[in-house]
Amino acid sequence: MSKKILNFLVLEDDDLARLNLVTHLKEYGLVRETNNSKEAIDLLSKEKFDIAWIDLDLETELAGLKVIQHATGSNAYAVVLSGREEDEYIEKAYELGCDDYLSKPFDKESLLLVLRKYRVLKSESKLRNFFSKKYITQNEKFIKSLQVINEIIGSDKPIFIKGETGTGKTLISKLIHEILFESMDKFIHLNCSEIPENLLESELFGYEKGAFSGAETSKKGKLELADGGTLFLDEIATMPISTQKKLLKAIDEKTFYPLGSEKERKSNFRLMSATCEDLEQMVKDGRFREDLYFRIEGFNVTLPNLVERKGDIPLLIKHLLGQGKRRIVLSSEVKNILENYSWPGNIRELKKVIEVLQSKCHGVISKEDLPIHISGIIQGSNGSDLDSQTEELSIREGVLTNKQLEFIRHNGLKAFMDAVEEDCVNTLFEENDQKVRQTLSVLKISNSSFYRITDRIKKAL
């Protein structure tokens, strides 16, 4: 990913300190330097600077204070560099508009912190662009909640994203990564639920040749690949307890051992994780380590369900319809149904429905074209409604009865789907002698989905 070339002004009368700062800054942009306040003010009036680095004590005591005013007046991000630690001077500098106050001598990490903060504070247009083109929303409350990014930049704490399936956790994680690490291209994504339990550890930590049967060559794990960037662990709730223990050590110490290796590896990464599960309940049930839970929770971002963003549904429909090459028209009745449907699968479900509608042989979409679980219509071969006909009916990809449809009309699809899930899990769990792995194989669902359903059953008892 290319980084924006920044324009810096450095005002520092100590030759060695100025040389040190200018050398570091040249990695990130163009630098103009001076050792006196008069020349600095002149440069600020003639040129456009992104960040001005200002020493307070110059040719006269606290001459830099006047430069702060000129820097902020020209919309430059003003950073004070000073050996003065007294509160009165720090307060005065902030009153005049400085954005950061760094103590001398400063290190490169302090410089990088300022650059990250500058990028985030200047990224509102980037956020707006993201929410108008990628993650479609006009929900100001939700957009405002992402201001937590401003707090993230000053800390190496992990980031934890909570949200139901289909709410866009991966998209948001990539947005945060791009804002925090504009100059970095390392975004390592691992969906823990997609990797079999016996392979997850090797995928995460890597392995040496001969570490196990089939390991014909050495392979770097996601931890090592994420060195210097972001490691995003999606659906972390599905991670086995044994792997959780090893991950905790890697997070705390930034070191780990690949499978079959006696050589310790180091990796300095920013951790982001996400889940649709209730981790607090999983901790209580002993299915997720409490110490890891507290370690991955740092700055939390909660994504709302689509039903909580009803005002965004028309925008999303318009956006998704424009993604395909084929153009279709939705009737006003269809629009009304889609805008008032509960969307338990969130944005992902809406996207799939739009794709189905775009594949229809005709271009004007009516209620009859909608998936049955959304429209609630059942039709026979002659086109007549079948509410008064046989109780058991084959409907496209599933089987529903009139009683089931009536239940959906009165209680909603989510309540019906919950009841179906619970009945299926209960029945097949008993049929398979209460063997979890065997039941999962029959149901073809993940560990996390199974325990999410059984947790719901327990709460209902």
Image (spheres, grey):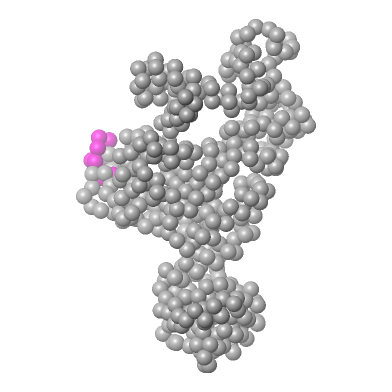
Q: Residue furthest right?
A: 332
Q: Nearer the viewer, residue 378 or 133?
A: 378
Highlighted magenta segment, given as a residue range: 207-214
Q: Nearer the viewer, residue 372 or 415?
A: 415
Residue visible at 59% across and 28% down? Answer: 414
Compared across the picture, whether 395 is left or right of 270 comes to right
| Dominant SS in magenta | loop
Residue visible at 30% across and 39% down? Answer: 242
Q: Quadrant of residue 285?
A: top left
Compared across the picture, whether 135 is left or right of 18 comes to right
Residue visible at 46% across and 68% down? Answer: 112
Q: Position of residue 48 (x, y in %)?
A: 63, 76
Q: Residue furthest top?
A: 390
* Res 187 visible: no
Compared across the picture, whether 258 is left or right of 456 comes to left
Q: Residue furthest bottom?
A: 60
Q: Position of residue 43 (x, y in %)?
A: 61, 83
Residue visible at 56% across and 44% down? Answer: 303
Q: Position of residue 273 (x, y in %)?
A: 45, 47
Q: Residue furthest left?
A: 262
* Res 107 visible: yes
Q: Is residue 339 magenta?
A: no
Q: Quadrant of residue 374?
A: top right
